[in-house]
Amino acid sequence: MGWGELDTSKDSFELISKLILADYRYIRNDVTEVTGGMPLYHSILTGIANGDGQMHSAFKRANISNDVGSKAIEELCELGIIYKVKSKKIFTSWKENESVSNKFYFTSPFIKFWFAFVSPLFKGARDGDFNEIKTKFLNKKNEYYQAQFIHLAQESIKIQFSESDPIVEIGSYWDSEHTLDIFAKTKSNKTIVGNVKYTNTKSKKSELTKLKDMTKSAKIDADIYIIFSKEGFSSELKSLKSESLKLYTIKSLKNLLK
């Protein structure tokens, strides 16, 4: 965006108001150049930005049919605005004939932000009244950050394992009943599963219990469990750290900056 250095000690919404919302008309024109300005595209992008990324839920939010939406999704992928991700399929865990929807992610976190918070409430941004956008942002920001945190955690884990047992594939796992933020395979064929917690409280032992229960229910044989927690861990959970349980905090992301 050409903003140069940002003072990240300032309140997030203060920066958003000054740098984005106050410049709404110009940035809207730039976004329109990227998307082509088609209302159908914008409806779908808003559906993806405010949902779980699965195609059927985006279409439901946008109130469009599967046939119309599917073609538009393909075109948005061709434009490079979004990209498709498949669940890390484990044949032994999926029910016979179970169909698991792909998910779609934004190539640019800024474009996701725009369609999550600005585009659906454009009248306020246009008229200089940012209260409705602020309310939605404050209510949904942790949910929005969570998605970005998962991607950063996955990239950081690649580095964490790069010397001991390199990661050969990593992503997320989901089916009709289960969701795991991290599913990875190492060079030695070990299976890693994990969850990422972007919350303002420390993760407790119960998080490990839930992770193990989810993994067992999905019929996944895990060799290593990972919990990535923004605010760290309880003493009880930290005492369980081992070769089969890795605990990382937001400080672990420093390896992405090197």
Image (cartoon, rainbow, N blue to C red):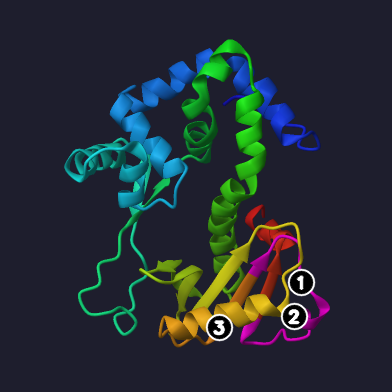
**x and y, in percent, of residue 125 in the image:** 57, 18
Q: Are marks 2 and 1 in contact (CB under 8 Å)?
A: yes
- Tell me, for residue 233, which label it has, or none: 1
Q: Is residue 180 visible?
A: yes
Give the magenta range: 228-245
Q: Is residue 164 visible?
A: no
Q: Main secondary structure of the magenta part?
A: loop
- Closer to us: 3 or 215: 215
**Quadrant (top left, top right, bottom left, bottom right) of the N terminus:** top right
From what the image shows, is residue 160 above or below residue 117?
A: below
| Mark 1: amino acid | Phe
**x and y, in percent, of residue 177 in the image:** 40, 71
- Closer to us: 61 or 160: 61
From what the image shows, is residue 46 above or below residue 144?
A: above
How many discs appear?
3
| Mark 3: amino acid | Lys
Query: Which residue does the numbered mark 3 point to in the structure image?
Result: 212
- Tell me, for residue 237, which label it has, or none: 2
Q: What is the C-alpha distance between the residues marked 3 and 1? A: 17 Å
- Closer to us: 128 or 190: 128
| Mark 2: amino acid | Leu
Determine the secondary structure under disc 2: helix
Question: Is residue 230 covered in magenta?
Answer: yes
Q: Is residue 128 left or right of residue 175?
A: right
Identity of the residue drawn at 31% across and 85% down = 92
Question: Is residue 181 covered in magenta?
Answer: no
